[in-house]
């Protein structure tokens, strides 16, 4: 690499108690309360130069390198992730009587989902800190991304996934050279089995909130929206929510932009968490005005990426929803199936069930008159629907 990373990373901080830690392999969660850590940056006075620097760089995630945690360019790992299209859909603007409606199509990332963002950053950081192998429990897309980026970084990947995950996911992981372990039960069961596996316990855990770096890659969606909309963020963002990291990452991005003085009028979007009726712990907690979730028993949905009974990002996601004056709502699998067809035919985007859930939720919000006609709305399609064909 012919350039420096120029990261403004300063320290790690506990998201619960506020304890401060150095950025190193030894500190990946709070040693006192065991809660997740977050990366903190020294935003000023360098922030004024960021927009000009970003605009002069290539169309990939690492254009935002000042606000990413990698210190040395030689450790960078990339498959060309990020800078996915923001597609305006006039047909839906007329149908839903809204000012502007967009789809942010994360299915166009390498490995077909937004998980590529987080894995690009966390695998690069694992490499920088000297890790030789990585491990995670996954519902599918994160495992594929982890396997691909581990291959690019020449690290060994151990992927644990529920046994009813479609074969397309495990097969692709194996083609990337990962060791795949299929586990009976839900995601939290797969994580438990991984914690007892001898090889996996020697690996660097790249699972959700097991370290602070995956969130950093995911937040670049927010930076991209800011650039793609010329500094005018949308009024409302609908996000398919499983572990809660996507919602938390967007709110983190907007908060960093605000702290850097880059938001016009200080306006941040209202966030909407969308979950399936068969697994909606964040929706339930939001309706009860709770600070955290309770485990959702017997989770069941075709939107496998949202089948997370115990979301590790629940506290941060709920905080983002409350702070943004947002919503949380659930939709049925039937509505998701219908929305998959409608998103494909109406926007030219073949969505995963998770992304389609946002269109079903938009209809629900519009019918309940919770969105003003003057609003600009962004739906996040988290992944391509290609791997889900057997479920349909």
Image (tube, grey):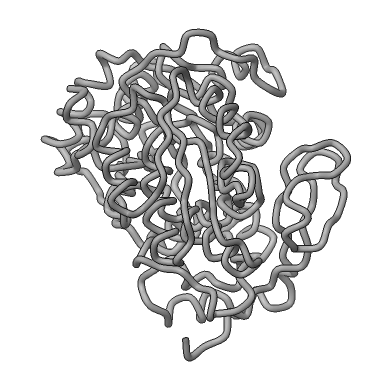
| Residue 318: quarter of image | top right
| Residue 232 visible (yes or no) | no
Task: Tell me where residue 238 appears, x and y as whole percent.
Answer: 42, 35
Task: Tell me where residue 338 appears, x and y as whole percent.
Answer: 19, 21
Would you place residue 211 above or below residue 98 in this image? below
Q: Which residue is depicted at the point 75% across and 69% down?
A: 42
In terms of depth relative to the viewer, which is nearer, 297 or 82? 297
Taking 311 as reference, is 85 left or right?
left
Task: Tell me where residue 63 appears, x and y as whole percent.
Answer: 47, 73
Q: Which residue is depicted at the point 61% across and 55% down?
A: 213
In terms of depth relative to the viewer, which is nearer, 118 or 362? 118
Taking 318 as reference, is 160 left or right?
left
Q: Residue furthest left?
A: 345
Q: Residue furthest front?
A: 198
Of the 4 image quadrants, the one containing the C terminus is top left
Q: Which residue is depicted at the point 61% across and 61% down?
A: 131
In terms of depth relative to the viewer, which is nearer, 129 or 209? 129
Q: Which residue is depicted at the point 60% across and 27% down?
A: 192
| Residue 322 visible (yes or no) | yes
Would you place residue 338 above or below residue 78 in this image? above
Task: Tell me where residue 235 appears, x and y as whole percent.
Answer: 46, 42
Would you place residue 50 above or below residue 184 in this image? below
């Amino acid at each position: 690499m012919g350039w420096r990373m120029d990261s403004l990373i300063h320290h790690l901080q506990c998201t619960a108690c506020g304890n401060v830690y150095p950025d190193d392999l030894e500190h990946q969660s709070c040693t006192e309360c065991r809660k997740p850590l977050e990366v903190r940056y020294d935003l000023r006075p360098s922030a004024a130069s960021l927009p000009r620097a970003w605009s002069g760089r290539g169309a990939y995630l690492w254009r935002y390198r000042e606000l990413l945690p990698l210190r040395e360019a030689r450790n960078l790992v990339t498959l060309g992730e990020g800078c996915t299209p923001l597609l305006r859909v006039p047909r839906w603007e007329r149908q839903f009587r809204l000012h502007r409606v967009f789809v942010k199509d994360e299915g166009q990332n390498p490995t077909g989902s937004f998980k590529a963002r987080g894995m690009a950053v966390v695998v690069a950081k694992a490499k920088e800190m000297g890790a030789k192998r990585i491990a995670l429990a996954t519902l599918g897309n994160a495992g594929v991304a982890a396997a691909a980026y581990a291959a690019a970084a020449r690290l060994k990947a151990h992927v644990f996934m529920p046994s009813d995950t479609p074969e397309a996911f495990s097969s692709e992981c194996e083609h990337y050279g990962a060791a795949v372990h299929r586990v009976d039960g839900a995601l939290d069961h797969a994580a438990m089995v991984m914690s007892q596996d001898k090889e996996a316990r020697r690996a660097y855990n790249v699972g959700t909130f097991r370290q602070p770096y995956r969130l950093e890659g995911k937040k670049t969606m927010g930076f991209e929206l800011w650039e793609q909309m010329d500094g005018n963020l949308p009024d409302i963002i609908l996000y398919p929510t499983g572990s809660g990291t996507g919602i938390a990452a967007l709110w983190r991005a907007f908060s960093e932009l605000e702290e850097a003085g880059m938001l016009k009028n200080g306006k941040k979007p209202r966030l909407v968490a969308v979950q399936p009726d068969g697994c909606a712990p964040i929706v339930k907690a939001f309706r009860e005005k709770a600070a955290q979730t309770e485990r959702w028993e017997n989770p069941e949905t075709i939107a496998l990426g949202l089948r997370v009974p115990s979301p590790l990002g629940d506290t941060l996601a709920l905080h983002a929803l409350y702070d943004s004056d947002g919503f949380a709502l659930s939709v049925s699998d039937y509505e998701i199936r219908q929305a998959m067809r409608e998103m494909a035919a109406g926007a030219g985007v073949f969505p995963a069930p998770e992304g389609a859930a946002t269109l079903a939720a938009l209809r629900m919000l519009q019918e309940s008159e919770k969105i003003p006609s003057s609003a600009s709305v962004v739906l996040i399609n988290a992944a391509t629907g290609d791997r889900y064909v057997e479920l349909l």
